[in-house]
Image (cartoon, rainbow, N blue to C red):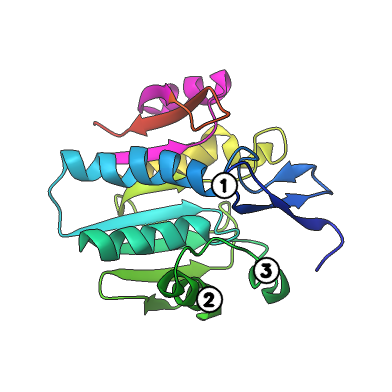
Amino acid sequence: MPDEIQIITTGDGSHSLLNTALNETYHSVHGARRESIHVFLKHGVEFFLKKNAIDVVKIFEVGFGTGLNALLSASFAEQKQQRITYTSIEAFPLSFDIIHKLNYAESDVEKDLFAKLHAVAWENEVSMNNYFSLMKVKTTLQEVILPPQSFDVVFFDAFAPSKQPELWEIPMLKKIFDALKLNGVFVTYCAKGQLKRDLKAIGFLVETLEGPPGKKEMVRALKIS
């Protein structure tokens, strides 16, 4: 395991990673799995589906990281029998030495699925189960080419603006806006005032929502025109 990456246990018992070089965790210290469910599943995918009857939900994730959001989305797709195509970018993939130690799986089915999510080749779309397909792309948000109006939901799970400010600037947020379909949903754990102002300036309808346990607020932004 690289010296700058340490496994920590969060408030709900699930693991996160601490990047000591950035002094930043991959997930909330108050509960990694709980945070992902609240921010990305509940207020992202589930919210979108309540508003839109659609056969296939197309998700784009900024920051594959530990694969937790992908695992939860794949499990959700199977449980709800809802087809999801999931595209995720990651500039610095984690080593299998780290991945194999993470405790996100809550069943043997999830354990196998989690291993498969990390084992599949990059730059190839692969079916994970009957309802979920994954394409991981080893690239940065600056470099990735996103076709216009191609995604329904965006999981913006980059490191915090104080750690990776270049990912939270208007050109990158505008890139996301353009890649979302009409009525598309952008969700993130971050609730900084500058982020909300920038999202509004781009054209999003911005909502400040109650955050997951241990965090006061989160942001959801809607592309309504």
- Would you name the residue on which mark 2 appears? 115
Element on which disc 3 rests: loop
- Label 3 amino acid? Lys
Q: Position of residue 195 (x, y in %)?
A: 53, 26
Closer-to-camera residue (179/57): 57
Q: Earlier in the sequence, mark 2 or mark 3?
A: 3
Name the residue at 45% across, 27% down.
Answer: 199
Q: Is residue 183 visible?
A: no
Element on which disc 2 rests: helix
Closer-to-camera residue (98/23): 98
Name the residue at 52% across, 58% down.
Answer: 68
Residues rendered magenta in the picture:
184-209
Binning the other alpha carbons within 10 Å of mark 3 as few (below 14), some (14 to 19) or many (20 upward) gives few
Up/down of 158 relative to 75, above or below: above
* Residues at marks 1 and 3 touching, judged by CB atoms closer than 8 Å: no
* Horizontal arrangement in the rendering, residue 39 relative to residue 139 (left or right): left
- Would you name the residue on which mark 1 appears? 32
Q: Which mark is residue 117?
A: none
- Label 1 amino acid? Ala
Name the residue at 72% across, 74% down.
Answer: 97
Up/down of 63 relative to 28, above or below: below
Q: Position of residue 50 (x, y in %)?
A: 18, 40
- Would you name the residue on which mark 3 appears? 101
Q: Earlier in the sequence, mark 1 or mark 3?
A: 1
- Label 2 amino acid? Ala
Q: Is residue 214 magenta?
A: no
Name the residue at 12% across, 48% down.
Answer: 53
> Which mark's residue is nearer the viewer, 2 or 3?
3
Q: Position of residue 165 (x, y in %)?
A: 67, 36
Q: Is residue 207 magenta?
A: yes
Q: Is residue 4 visible?
A: yes
* Horizontal arrangement in the rendering, residue 185 relative to residue 15 (left or right): left
